[in-house]
């Protein structure tokens, strides 16, 4: 048996049930993991990506706020861009160990072009707004989805949405965009209404913090999450090859 893939909501994208989150490829400061870790070197990172591909994972999640994750992926994925569905973000930057946010249309478009350059590609499969927690303000006052709709029409991105932090923001996202990234695990069920709404509207759902940043047993969390209809993919933040193999086994 192999890890299944499926359509991402109503888009044409096909994504694996588990995706590889790459924050640990580029950043190990101000992250919410229980244990310190060393950022993998290029050989270790290349091996992790090769293993992911062997395990039928095709979804990679990155962001400008993940240190030099995008830049490293741009080099590591040379010659294999079309094997991957790349999800990046805009709205947050992390410079000199400090996060800053800008959701203006000008900043979002500038961020997309910078990500394209770092990732060495001419399109992003998915672009999510990296929320600061004020989801409704970002959507309603900054009109971010109009900006992303225009970027999609220009061919810069293929699908768009938001990595949300509130139920209200998640509901607006699945109503107005292609995909929402939400928090959901056995100990945090608050955003279940967003998942249910997405299933009804045939929109994509990515799950973050599936293991509560490493605090929950992986097998229990993966089995619990994948029982819920409407989940497109769980984003795993591991850099441990054995953990990755085990997590895929739990999801099959």
Image (cartoon, grey):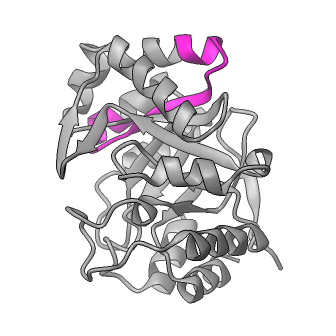
Among the 4 quarters of the image, the one containing residue 76: bottom right
**Residue 164 sits in which quadrant?**
top left
State the image quarter where residue 210 is shown. Answer: bottom left
Residue at position x 58%, y 89% in the image: 242
Q: Is residue 10 left or right of residue 2?
A: left
Left or right, 5 with reference to 164:
right
Q: Is residue 231 visible?
A: no
Q: Residue farthest to the right?
A: 1
Q: Magenta segment range?
A: 150-170
Q: Position of residue 12 (x, y in %)?
A: 76, 34
**Residue 83 in the image: x percent, y percent?**
78, 51
Q: Residue at x 35, y 52 (%)?
A: 67
Q: Nearer the viewer, residue 3 or 125?
A: 125
Q: How many numbered markers are drawn?
A: 0
Q: Is residue 163 magenta?
A: yes
Q: Quadrant of the C terminus?
A: bottom right
Which sits in the foreground, 165 or 74?
Answer: 74
The answer to whether any part of residue 249 appears in the image is yes
Q: Is residue 199 above or below residue 177?
A: below
Q: Depth check: 197 or 155 in front? A: 155
Residue 251 image point, x, y percent: 64, 76
Q: Tell me what residue is drawn at x 44 percent, y 18 percent.
A: 109
Residue 226 is inside the magenta segment: no
The picture places residue 102, in percent across and down from the top left corner, at 24, 25
Q: Is residue 143 left or right of residue 73?
A: left
Q: In which quadrant will I find the N terminus?
A: bottom right
Q: In the image, is residue 149 above or below residue 125? A: above
Q: What residue is at 74 percent from the left and 70 percent from the top?
A: 3
């Amino acid at each position: 048996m192999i890890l299944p893939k499926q359509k991402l909501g109503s888009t044409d994208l096909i994504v694996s049930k588990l995706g590889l989150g790459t924050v640990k490829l580029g950043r190990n400061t101000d992250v919410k993991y229980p244990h310190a870790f060393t950022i993998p070197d290029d050989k270790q990172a290349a091996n992790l990506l090769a293993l992911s591909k062997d395990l039928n994972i095709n979804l990679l999640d990155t962001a400008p706020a993940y240190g030099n994750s995008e830049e490293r992926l741009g080099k590591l994925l040379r010659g294999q861009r079309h094997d991957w569905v790349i999800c990046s973000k805009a709205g947050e930057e992390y410079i000199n160990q400090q996060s800053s946010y800008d959701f203006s249309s000008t900043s979002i478009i500038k961020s997309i072009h910078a990500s394209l350059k770092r990732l060495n590609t001419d399109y992003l499969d998915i672009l999510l707004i990296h929320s600061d927690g004020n989801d409704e303000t970002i959507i309603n006052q900054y009109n971010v989805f109009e900006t992303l709709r225009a970027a999609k029409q220009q061919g810069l991105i293929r699908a768009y949405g938001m990595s949300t932090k509130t139920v209200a923001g998640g509901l607006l996202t699945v109503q107005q965009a292609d995909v929402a990234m939400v928090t959901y695990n056995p100990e945090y069920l608050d955003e279940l209404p967003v998942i249910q709404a997405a299933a009804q509207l045939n929109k994509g759902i990515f799950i973050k913090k599936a293991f509560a940043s490493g605090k929950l047993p992986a097998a229990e969390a993966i089995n619990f999450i994948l029982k819920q209809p409407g989940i497109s993919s769980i984003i795993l933040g591991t850099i441990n090859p054995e953990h990755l193999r085990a997590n895929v086994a739990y999801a099959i």
